[in-house]
Amino acid sequence: RQNATLEKMAETLFRQWFVEEAKEEWDEGTLDDILTVKGGSTPSTSEPAYWNGKIHWTSPKDITNLNGIYLFDTERKITELGLSKISSGLLPKGTLLMSSRAPVGVLAFCEVPVAINQGYIAILDNKGYSKEFIYLWLKANIDVVHSFSNGSTFMEISKTAFKTLQLQLPPKQVMTDFQLLVKPLFNKIKSNHIQIRTLTALRDTLLPKLMSGEVRVD
């Protein structure tokens, strides 16, 4: 509940700064001006040498089933040989992931280095605009993202189309000031998620022992 409140606070700040108080003199640009995108692939599942290694590999299933916005683990792992089959390689911790198909627009921050499959657009914040700002912009404009999706079997947005989405480009000083406000909110959300993971693991370890009588509480 606290995390939901914190995220709503961040979304409210974004709306206030970049919608209600946006300046007409701000430059117009596209997402390509503020971020770099990467795509992924799936190593052949019929080749055992690619799978069951120690490298995190993610499909959108990992984040559509995620209870939160931070990805700490993945269902499947690949080997170094499997990683060599993915052109985008290993993406760094902190990468923002957006599912690009079935469904479009689910978002999560990676807390481990990951390789990704073809169902993602991976976003690197290497152009002076923070991943928190990008995350909040995408949340606020998810209908625009959906409108650029197409497909006969399932809806999908391409990296090319994604990069053309238009937005106003706030000055760097505005971005710096905004980041000082929202970064602590996201840090607290992440801290809460880590605590939830720790408590969940503790519960899952203790509960069977309590039920079997292996551990007793006086």
Image: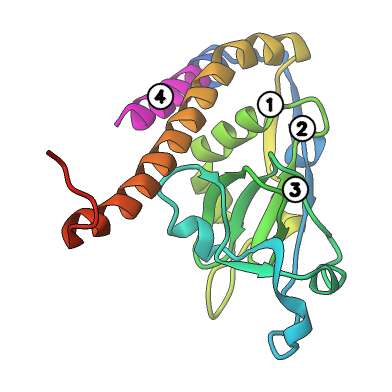
Q: Are marks 2 and 3 in contact (CB under 8 Å)?
A: no
Horizontal placement of 158 versus 138: left or right?
right
Q: Earlier in the sequence, mark 3 or mark 1?
A: 3
**Mark 3 → mark 4, Cα distance in angstroms:** 28 Å
- Return the residue at label 1: 168
The amino acid type found where label 3 is placed reads: Lys
Q: Nearer the viewer, mark 1 or mark 4?
A: 4
Q: Nearer the viewer, mark 3 or mark 4?
A: 4
Q: Quadrant of residue 172?
A: top right
Q: Are marks 3 and 1 in contact (CB under 8 Å)?
A: no
Residue range corresponding to the magenta coloring: 1-15
- Return the residue at label 2: 29
Q: Earlier in the sequence, mark 2 or mark 3?
A: 2
**Mark 3 → mark 1, Cα distance in angstroms:** 14 Å
Tell me which residue sits at (54%, 47%) in the image: 107
Tell me which residue sits at (53%, 74%) in the image: 154
**Mark 2 → mark 1, Cα distance in angstroms:** 6 Å
- Say the numbered circle drawn on residue 163: 3
**Mark 2 → mark 3, Cα distance in angstroms:** 10 Å
- Return the residue at label 4: 6
The front one of 80 and 18 is 80
Q: Are marks 2 and 4 in contact (CB under 8 Å)?
A: no
Q: Position of residue 85 (x, y in %)?
A: 85, 73
Q: Are marks 2 and 1 in contact (CB under 8 Å)?
A: yes
Q: Earlier in the sequence, mark 1 or mark 4?
A: 4
The front one of 199 and 64 is 199
Majority secondary structure in the magenta region: helix
